[in-house]
Image (cartoon, grey):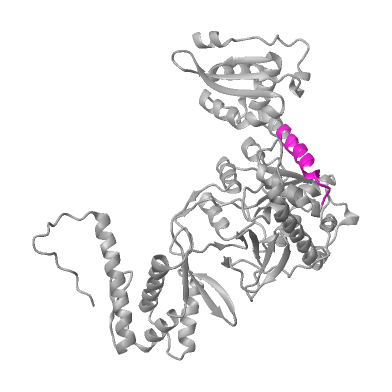
Amino acid sequence: MREPSAVADGEPVGEETPGQKSSDRVDELREVIRDALGCLRELGVATEGQGRSGAIAPLGSRQVSQLLAVAETVQLFRTSDGIAYADLEIDGHRETWAVRDRGFRRWLTQRVLASGAGMPPSKALRDVLDLLEVRALSAGPVREVGVRLGGLGGRIYLDLGNAAWRAIEIDANGWHIVDRPPLRFRRPAGARPLPPPERGGSITTLRSFLNLSTEDDLAMIVAWLLAALCDRGPYPVLVLGGEAGAGKSTFMAMMQALIDPSSARLRSLPAGEPALIAAAHDSHVLAFDNLSSLPGWFSDALCRMVSGGGFTVRRDGGTAAGVLAGVARPVMLNGIAELITRPDLADRALFVTLNGIRADKRRTEAELWDDFEAKRPRLLGALLDAVATGLARLPQTTVREAPRMADLARWVEACEPALFVPGAFKALYAINREGAARDAIESDPFVIGVHEFVCRQGRWAGSATQLHDEVAEIMGARVRDQAWPGNARVLASRLRQGAAFLRRCGIDVAFGRVGAHGKRVIWLFVMPGSEADARRPADATPRSTASLASVASD
């Protein structure tokens, strides 16, 4: 083994920083590992290896020799977020496993046992995993790993999840199944296979599995499916409403089965953000069932998740990264009550209502799923045809007067000629968002109060405290509602959240500062010609109240 180099005579010796010591130690350990492997190959005798605990493990046994021989056949790489992976050749196909995954550890152990060498020592197995991780992170090529779906080189890949590890490759010319997709995929424990898609299907077949309130709702559902098959977010939240017995849970499970089937079809409300991140780590589609309300933290987290925001989680020694940056997932929610009351989340959602199912139309669960399974291959094929159309048309597709989810609108507009009349989604999406705005206002007593107040005043300027008092006077007893902002700071935050919805109802909102001391001011006014302007009561006050000068001098 190499000895540490001595300091040359006369060379000044300074104190090492902690970072330098750590870097030097890593380099030294890498040299030790290389020398140990060299000794083993050349002499076949015992040597030494450094494990996680710092103890010395013998590396000369037959089991360890076979373990290292197997490790030498592994093709290693790393992801951009610093996770080590291995490509394995198994039964004529390629599989991809994280080096720290239990499945990879089992594969190494099984290979050694199959050679007749016996069970490798646990300490030696840990040492070899450490070695492979160092190799992958220090010298392995960088590749990205997807869960069920991802994009590479202008193509979209959908993992079939079957035993042969095949995938569907979609490009501007169509789609086909490939044996070794250039984009690697990992397989979470609950992942289930997709059926091989078939051509010649129609997306309208979905109608037979739901009891829609309007035919336009089908376009919203298909738009969500097309978004979920895109390789990048932002993704909309699909919100299914309806009375008990409307089939919301079953239909949501079918939507998940079309793209990302799992043994755990639907989830309950997660206990906290770490549980939500764990679910996103192991699934492409997240479906939350039978919710009665959404906590504030969950609404905030979903806003980040559908838009590709970053989340920080603790590294647990498995495949989870320390920081999951840019995680974007398609999400579905269902419940009987109005679930989304936060304007920022409502602006990222598609709302669909299912009617109750008449007794003479109800089918058993088994009959329904048998029918769905028979039609699933062609339904998937129809969606893939639309995705290929979208990839071909996307470069030439532009959206005028783009909504907040502009990428969604552009993607669906590029795909829709394969499924609908061009331009149909844009009109329906506008109606859907208007309905969401009305629902958000009707479910929030504070926003209702602001709406009524500004309609009466026409124009207003003042502080958050003034607005709080004046709107409270209009709302009277309703101020006692728990949703009412308790102070000026909370009021300003709630008003910012609801500003986009108020504008769609004809009330503009602006924030700023005036005067020499930079006093905070809120401006509210009814936009001329808007619905709010038309609905102003006849006895409303003229459109002139507090001026900027008076506000600044208060």
In this view, the residue in front, 32 or 152, is 152
The question of residue 452 being in magenta is answered with no
Q: Residue at x 47, y 77 (%)?
A: 74
Q: What's the magenta bit mostly, secondary-structure-wise?
A: helix
> Which quadrant of the structure image shows residue 524?
top right
Q: Residue furthest right?
A: 360
Return the residue found at the far front: 396
Q: Residue at x 51, y 64 (%)?
A: 143
Q: Is 10 displayed left or right of 109 in the figure?
A: left
Q: Position of residue 470 (x, y in %)?
A: 61, 16
Q: Is residue 131 visible?
A: yes
* Residue located 76% across and 45% down the image: 352
Please give the count of numbered marks on the rendered protein: 0
Is residue 188 visible in the rendered image? The answer is: no
Depth check: give the residue in front, 99 or 473: 99
Quadrant position of residue 38: bottom left
- In the image, residue 189 above or below residue 37: above
Q: Is residue 426 magenta?
A: yes
**Percent position (x, y) of residue 410?**
70, 45
Residue 338: percent from the left, percent from the top?
A: 70, 40
Q: From what the image shows, is residue 233 above or below residue 319?
A: above
| 520 is higher (above) or lower (below) than 191 | above
Question: What segment carries the magenta color?
Answer: 420-438
Camera-side residue of 59 and 119: 59
Quadrant occupied by the N terminus: bottom left
- Give the residue drawn at x 54%, y 47%: 309
Instruction: Determine the residue located farthest toward the bottom in the rendered image.
Output: 116
Of 4 and 517, nearer the camera is 4
Q: Quadrant of residue 541?
A: top right
Horizontal and vertical percent position of residue 311: 50, 49
